[in-house]
C-alpha cells in the first residue's frame, strides 16, 4: 500500500482482522491482504464493507458488456429517433429485471436537425462538397438507415457567400496572428480545423471578428492518416469522415437553449428562439478532410505559420481567397422529447442522502464508443448492485443510477434533470460520479479535489486488467514514465496521492458540479490504442471490438472502480471527504494566478494577499479536520453524536465554493474554483472569475472576483471547522 499510515489506521488493524472472522472465505482472504482500514468506516463496518465490495467486483462480466453494447449500438440513436427512446426503455427494463426501481423522466427541448446543407466553391474552380460519409463494407452498421447527416447542432440558419480564410484552430490567439499577417475575416467565411478548443468556440470567435460563416474540418494531422492507419484498416478517421457535434455556446450555459436555469418539463415557460443566448450568430458546418482539401488548395495570400500547417498534401495558405464559397444550412427547429432513465436504490439509514452516478445513452449516430462503452459499464455496476441487494446488502444512503439523454447536443438530459430537481439536489446530493466513452489503457480521473484522496484509495483496491497490480499502480507507473521535470519526479516520489485533474466541461458532470456545487468525479480508461471515429458513422460496434476495448476487460474494470466508488460513498459512516489535498490544489491555483499577474499586463501588480490568507486558513481547517477524524476513528466514531449533521456538513461543503451571482457574463456557472473557459470550452479555468478577468483584461473585475473567491474559500474553511467540532464531540 502506498498510503501513509495515519492515526486513522494504525490503532485498528488488529481489531479489523478480528472482525473479519464473520466474513465468507473469499472476502476474508482478500481483506486479510489489506494493510489498512477504510477512511470513514469503523473497524467492524470496514470489514463488512470490504467483503461486500469484493463480492460486487466479482460480478461484472465482459461478455455482458459486449452483449449490451451490441444491442444499444445496433441502430442510430440520437435525440428524437425511435431507437433513442427504445434504448431508454430497454435500459429501464434491465434495471427492473435486476430488482431495481427505474423510470423514465421526460423533457421537451429544442433540438435542430438539418433540412438543407449546401457547400460549394464557386471561384476560382467549381467544387461541390459531398457532405456524406460513405458506408464501409467491413462495418455493417455504417450503412444503417436513419443516420443524422454531418452537421453542427445549434448553428443558426444561413445562406452566405464569401471569400475563404484559413484560421488554424480559430481561437483568439489565431486571430491575433492573422492581424499580424494583415488578413481580416470581416465579411468572409472562415475554415478552421478541429482541435485547440472546444468546437463551439470557433464560430463564436469567428463571429466576434466579423466572419459571416464558419467551416470546421478534421485535418489528418490531428485526426486522420498522419496519426495512423484509417478505418477500416486502422482506428483513425477516413478521408470522408466528419465530426458532428454541438456548437451551442456552452460556456454561457448548457442544457435546453430555451429554458436556461429551469427545467424543460412539459408546459414549462420557454424563451423565444431569438432570445436564446447560446445559438451561434453565424452558420456553421463540419466537413471531412476530403471535402476541405479542394478548397484549401485554392487559397493564396500569406503561407500559414508553421504551427498552423496540417498534413494535407498542399502548402497551407491563409487567404483570403481567391477561393470563394457558398454555404447554406437550414434546420428543422422543432421540439424533441428527451428520455432520461433514473434507477434508484433506497438507502436504509439515510434515504435523503443521495449518491448519483450517470452516463449518457444518446449518441450522434450508433455511438458504440461514445457513449455506449461507458453506459454498459454503468449497467454492469447496476446489475452487480442488484445482485448484492438480493444477497442482503443494504446501502446506508440512496443510490441513483442515471442514463442521460441528449448529452451530445449540450448536456441536455442531465442539465434539465438537475435544474428540475435543483432544490432537492442541493439538500440531498452527496456526490455525482460521471462516466462516458471508455477504452483500454489506464484509469483517468478528474474531479473535485475534496475527493482526490478517496479516488486514490479506491484505485488501490481494483486490479488493473491483464496485470498483477492495482489500477493505482498502473496510473503511477505511467506518470513516473511521463514525468519530465525534477519537481514532477520529486512530487511523484513524495506525495501520497496522485493528483486528479480539475473538471472543465464535456460531459454530464457540469450541471452537478458547476451549477449546484455538488462534488463530482469523472472516470474512464484510455491512453492505449487511440482513434478517430468520434461523432461519425464509424463509431460502431465493428470499430469498438477491433480498436476500442476488444475483450471488454477494461470496461469491466470501470464497472469495478465505479461500483466501489458508489458503494463506499453510500455505506461510509463518515463520508470520505478530505480537504488537505483540496487546500493544496487551490494553493497551486493561486500560485498560477500570481505568475499570470507577474506577466506585467496590468499597470500595477495585483495584491493576492487576501486570497493567500484565505488558502492559509483553509489549510489549517483541513489539518484540524484530519486530526479530529483520526482521533474520532480510534473508537469507531462512538463520541460523535451528530453523525447525520456531520455528513451533511461534509457533502454540502462543495456548495460553499459557489456564489449565487455566478461568473461574469455567465451567471449559470456558479463554482468559484472550476469552470469551463469562456474561450476554451471544454478546457478548465481554475479560480475562473479572477483568471479570466486577468486573461481577458477585464481589470475592473479583478477585485470583485477576488472577493467572491476569498468569500467562498473562507466559507468552506468555516464549514470544515464546524465538521471538525462535531468530530471532536463539541
Ligand atoms: Zn459522450
Image (cartoon, grey):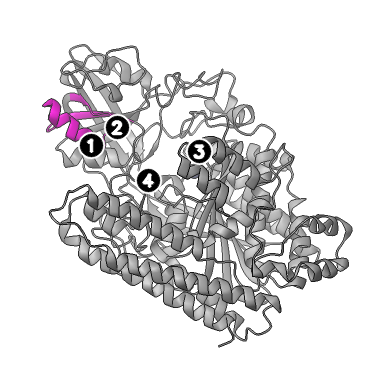
Circle 2 sits on which residue? 169
Q: Assess whether mark 4 and mark 3 are in contact (beta carbons under 8 angstroms).
A: no
Magenta region includes residue 175: yes
As drawn, the label of residue 483 is: 3
Can you tell me whether the CB of the residue at mark 1 lies under 8 Å from the nearest atom of ligand 1? no
Q: Is residue 605 placed above or below 9 in the rendered structure?
A: above
Label 3, secondary structure: give it.
loop
Sequence-first tag of 3 and 4: 3
Q: Assess whether mark 4 and mark 2 are in contact (beta carbons under 8 angstroms).
A: no
What residue range appears in magenta?
164-193
Circle 4 sits on which residue? 683
As drawn, the label of residue 173 is: 1
Judge by depth and name the residue closer to the eye, 88 or 278: 278
Q: CA distance from mark 3 to mark 2?
A: 28 Å
Judge by depth and name the residue closer to the eye, 723 or 288: 723
Sequence-first tag of 4 and 1: 1
Residue 617 location in percent, x, y? Answer: 40, 72
Amino acid at each position: 500500500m502506498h498510503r501513509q499510515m495515519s492515526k486513522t489506521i494504525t490503532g485498528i488493524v488488529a481489531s479489523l482482522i478480528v472482525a473479519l472472522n464473520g466474513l465468507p472465505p473469499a472476502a476474508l482472504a482478500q481483506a486479510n491482504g489489506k494493510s489498512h482500514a477504510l477512511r470513514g468506516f469503523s473497524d467492524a463496518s470496514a470489514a463488512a464493507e470490504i467483503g461486500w465490495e469484493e463480492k460486487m467486483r466479482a460480478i461484472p462480466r465482459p461478455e455482458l458488456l459486449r452483449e449490451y453494447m451490441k444491442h444499444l449500438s445496433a441502430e442510430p440513436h440520437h435525440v428524437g429517433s425511435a431507437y433513442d427512446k427504445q434504448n431508454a426503455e430497454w435500459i429501464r427494463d434491465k434495471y427492473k429485471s435486476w430488482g431495481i426501481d427505474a423510470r423514465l423522466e421526460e423533457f421537451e427541448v429544442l433540438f435542430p436537425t438539418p433540412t438543407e446543407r449546401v457547400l460549394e466553391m464557386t471561384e476560382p474552380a467549381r467544387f461541390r462538397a459531398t457532405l456524406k460519409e460513405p458506408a464501409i463494407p467491413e462495418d455493417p452498421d455504417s450503412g444503417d438507415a436513419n443516420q443524422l447527416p454531418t452537421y453542427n447542432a445549434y448553428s443558426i440558419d444561413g445562406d452566405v457567400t464569401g471569400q475563404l480564410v484559413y484560421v488554424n484552430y480559430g481561437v483568439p490567439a489565431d486571430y491575433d496572428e492573422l492581424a499580424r499577417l494583415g488578413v481580416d475575416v470581416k465579411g468572409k467565411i472562415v475554415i478552421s480545423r478541429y482541435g485547440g478548443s472546444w468546437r463551439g468556440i470557433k464560430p463564436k470567435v469567428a463571429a466576434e471578428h466579423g466572419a459571416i460563416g464558419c467551416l470546421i474540418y478534421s485535418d489528418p494531422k490531428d485526426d486522420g492518416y498522419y496519426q495512423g492507419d484509417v478505418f477500416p484498416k486502422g482506428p483513425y478517421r477516413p478521408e470522408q469522415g466528419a465530426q458532428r457535434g454541438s456548437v451551442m455556446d456552452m460556456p454561457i450555459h448548457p442544457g435546453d437553449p430555451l429554458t436556461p436555469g429551469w427545467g424543460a418539463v412539459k408546459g414549462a415557460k420557454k424563451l423565444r428562439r431569438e432570445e436564446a443566448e447560446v445559438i451561434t450568430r453565424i452558420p456553421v458546418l463540419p466537413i471531412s478532410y476530403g471535402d476541405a482539401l479542394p478548397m484549401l488548395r485554392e487559397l493564396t495570400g500569406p503561407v500559414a505559420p508553421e504551427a498552423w500547417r496540417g498534413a494535407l498534401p498542399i502548402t497551407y495558405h491563409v487567404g483570403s481567397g481567391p477561393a470563394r464559397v457558398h454555404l447554406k444550412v437550414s434546420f428543422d427547429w422543432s421540439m424533441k422529447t428527451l428520455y432520461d432513465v433514473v434507477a434508484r436504490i433506497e438507502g436504509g439509514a439515510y434515504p435523503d442522502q443521495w449518491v448519483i452516478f450517470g452516463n449518457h445513452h444518446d449518441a450522434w449516430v450508433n455511438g458504440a464508443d461514445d457513449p455506449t462503452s461507458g453506459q454498459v459499464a454503468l449497467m454492469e455496476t447496476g446489475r452487480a448492485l442488484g445482485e448484492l441487494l438480493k444477497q442482503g446488502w443494504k446501502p446506508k444512503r440512496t443510490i441513483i443510477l442515471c442514463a442521460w439523454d441528449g448529452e451530445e447536443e449540450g448536456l441536455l438530459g442531465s442539465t434539465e434533470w438537475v435544474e428540475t430537481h435543483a432544490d432537492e439536489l442541493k439538500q440531498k446530493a452527496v456526490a455525482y460520479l460521471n462516466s462516458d466513452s471508455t477504452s483500454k489503457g489506464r484509469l483517468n480521473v478528474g474531479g473535485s479535489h475534496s475527493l482526490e484522496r478517496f479516488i486514490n484509495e479506491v484505485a488501490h483496491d481494483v486490479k488493473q486488467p491483464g496485470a498483477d497490480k492495482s489500477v493505482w499502480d498502473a496510473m503511477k507507473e505511467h506518470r513516473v514514465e511521463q514525468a519530465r521535470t525534477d519537481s514532477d519526479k520529486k512530487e511523484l516520489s513524495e506525495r501520497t496521492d496522485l493528483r486528479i485533474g480539475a473538471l472543465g466541461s464535456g460531459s454530464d458532470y457540469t450541471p452537478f458540479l458547476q451549477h449546484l456545487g455538488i462534488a463530482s468525479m469523472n472516470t474512464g480508461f484510455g491512453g492505449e490504442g487511440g482513434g478517430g471515429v468520434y461523432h461519425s458513422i464509424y463509431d460502431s460496434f465493428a470499430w469498438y471490438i477491433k480498436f476500442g476495448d476488444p475483450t471488454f476487460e477494461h470496461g469491466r474494470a470501470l464497472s469495478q472502480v465505479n461500483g466501489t466508488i458508489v458503494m463506499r460513498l453510500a455505506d461510509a459512516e463518515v463520508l470520505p471527504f478530505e480537504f488537505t489535498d483540496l487546500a493544496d490544489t487551490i494553493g497551486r491555483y493561486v500560485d498560477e494566478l500570481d505568475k499570470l499577474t507577474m506577466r506585467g499586463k496590468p499597470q500595477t501588480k495585483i495584491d493576492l494577499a487576501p486570497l493567500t490568507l484565505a488558502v492559509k486558513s483553509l489549510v489549517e481547517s483541513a489539518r484540524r479536520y484530519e486530526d479530529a477524524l483520526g482521533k474520532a476513528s480510534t473508537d469507531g466514531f462512538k463520541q460523535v453524536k451528530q453523525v447525520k449533521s456531520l455528513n451533511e456538513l461534509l457533502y454540502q461543503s462543495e456548495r460553499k465554493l459557489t456564489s449565487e451571482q455566478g461568473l461574469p457574463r455567465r451567471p449559470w456557472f456558479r463554482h468559484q474554483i472550476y469552470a469551463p473557459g469562456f474561450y476554451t470550452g471544454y478546457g478548465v479555468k481554475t479560480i475562473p472569475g479572477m483568471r479570466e478577468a486577468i486573461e481577458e483584461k477585464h481589470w475592473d473585475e479583478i477585485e470583485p472576483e477576488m472577493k467572491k473567491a476569498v468569500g467562498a474559500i473562507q466559507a468552506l474553511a468555516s464549514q470544515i471547522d464546524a465538521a471538525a467540532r462535531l468530530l471532536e464531540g463539541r
